Amino acid sequence: MRSFFSKRSESLLKCVRQGARISKKDAKNFGIPVALVENSGRCNKNEHDEKILPTGTPWIPNLVHIITDVSLNGKSGILVDKKLIEGPNANDRGKVFIPLILAFQYFFVIKPIQKWIKDDIARESKPSWD
């Protein structure tokens, strides 16, 4: 079991180091912790139905906690204004011009096309087969 774990952890660490482009000499400075956890339905669970390590620690909440600590690097969160995320309301922009655009289309697009169709019908000669 130990050899299986060591082989798996070494191959995982190798992939992580390649993905992070950590050189072999720098790999000693970047100690990446590895833990063997069981994620099957038969593994031990606590009273909250969380999968636990042999020490009794629920490993998924602990993993999420460690990831957030590392990603925040001990800093507090950033307060972001909701308007900056969502941006301006697209429904408000240009709403005033809609009636003007519709009027322009009616008088300068639809009306001329209707006139051309009527003129074409008036100039149409009856086909010989009628």
Image: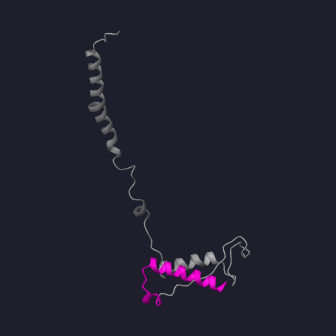
Is 23 in the magenta? yes
As rendered, which of 9 and 80 lies closer to the eye?
A: 9
- Residue 38 located left or right of residue 67: right
- In the image, is residue 129 above or below residue 13? above
Is 22 in the magenta? yes
- Residue 30 located left or right of residue 58: left
Q: Main secondary structure of the magenta part?
A: helix
Q: Position of residue 57 (x, y in %)?
A: 67, 81
Query: Residue sitting at 55 percent across and 83 percent down?
Result: 10
The image quadrant of residue 110 is top left
Q: Position of residue 22 (x, y in %)?
A: 43, 83
**Location of the N terminus (image quadrant):** bottom right
Q: Position of residue 68 (x, y in %)?
A: 52, 77
As rendered, which of 7 and 110 lies closer to the eye?
A: 7
**Location of the C terminus (image quadrant):** top left
- In the image, is residue 95 above or below residue 11? above
- In the image, is residue 101 above or below residue 71? above
Query: Residue sitting at 28 percent across and 35 percent down?
Result: 104
Query: Residue sitting at 45 percent across and 71 percent down?
Result: 79
Tally the marks: 0
Query: Residue sitting at 53 percent across and 77 percent down?
Result: 67
**Which colour assignment does the render follow?**
one colour
The image quadrant of residue 3 is bottom right
Q: Position of residue 99 (x, y in %)?
A: 33, 38
Please report the bounds of the magenta region as a residue range. 1-29
The image quadrant of residue 37 is bottom right
